[in-house]
Image (cartoon, rainbow, N blue to C red):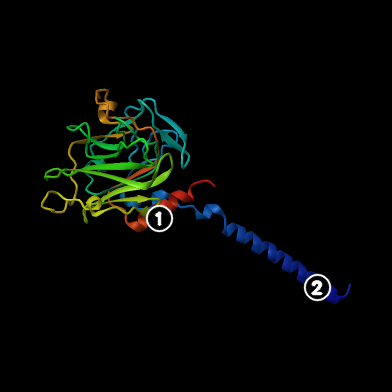
Amino acid sequence: MKKTDLFKLLTLGVALMSGLALTSCSKDDNNSDNKKVDPSTIASTDLVAYFPFDGNATEKVASLTPAVQPNVTYVTGRRGKAYQGADNAYLRYTLPANSKLKSLTSFSVAVWFKSPLVTGDPEPIFFQIGRSDDLYWGNLTLALNRLDANADSLQLKAFFYKDGVSWAPQHVPFSCSSFRINTWMHLIFEYDATTSKYKIFKDGVQVVTSSSVEDRYASSANDALGALKFINADVINIGAWRPKTEGTATDNWMGWFKGNLDELRVYDKALTATEAKALYDAEVSQIAE
């Protein structure tokens, strides 16, 4: 074989090997696993409770387990399994004495959420930090308001409490056409003690509300609400009003939550817009395509 032919073959071989190596690196660099972000790394120092609902009810930050969990089932969720609401189904946890959930002054509650339309008498709650001397609204409650049967979207309601001011209970209902019925949404409900503002984020983007929704006041004098002050916080209820979970409810309006919850997280601060978007993006990165 001529030297020139041998040189050409050697050159071609090197080129082929280089091409294979570059292709291999390219595949490694684009591996989908490299794009996954653990949502628990977002605002991790402010995360005070995390309920993955991945086939069980164990909370992962403080290792809380429910004192009672009748009729609870789990179905395919947004990530793994999800809580399935139903008649007579709920979770109730007893808060330990040192729980940070007892003394929230600001909060963010983030959750993958899906719910049917609520009409008629029942008004279900889906998350609550309860209060021993108020078995209804407690200290922090997230609920669904009842709507007309022809409604094409949901109305979500937040309640939170500051002891010692004229407007101690804050009831904040809000409707939005993007709160679709029976559709998975990533929602963040939050209150910021520094700004006295309540906000909602859907799929990582702040929902446009009004000043009457966002700005929270302690009295008719328009003094800012400031830091919340919970009292007698003792339980977490998921899926039902406390009188329902204790078997003492007689009011028709206290309905059962019949939707789905997944990846529920509670923070002891209001997430920034950047953190809210990062949390949503991280959640989506975990969803199998």
User: Which of the numbered marks, if any, corresponds to residue 8?
Assistant: 2
In what element is the residue under mark 2?
Answer: helix
Q: CA distance from mark 1 to mark 2?
A: 52 Å
245, above or below 285, in the image: above
Expressed as whole percent of the image width and height from the top left, the position of residue 125 reads 30, 35
Residue at the spot of label 1: 278
What residue is drawn where x is 76% and y is 71%?
11
Horizontal placement of 269 versus 177: left or right?
left
What residue is drawn where x is 57% and y is 59%?
29
Horizontal placement of 190 versus 71: left or right?
left
Q: Report the residue that reaches farthest toward the front.
A: 150
Query: Which quadrant would the N terminus be assigned to in this image?
Result: bottom right
Picture quadrant of residue 20: bottom right
Expressed as whole percent of the image width and height from the top left, the position of residue 55 reads 45, 34
Observer-side mark, 1 or 2, equals: 1
Q: Report the residue that reaches farthest toward the right.
A: 1
**Contact? badges 1 and 2 (CB < 8 Å):** no
Indicate the amino acid at tag 2: Lys
Which of these two is toward me, 94 or 72?
72
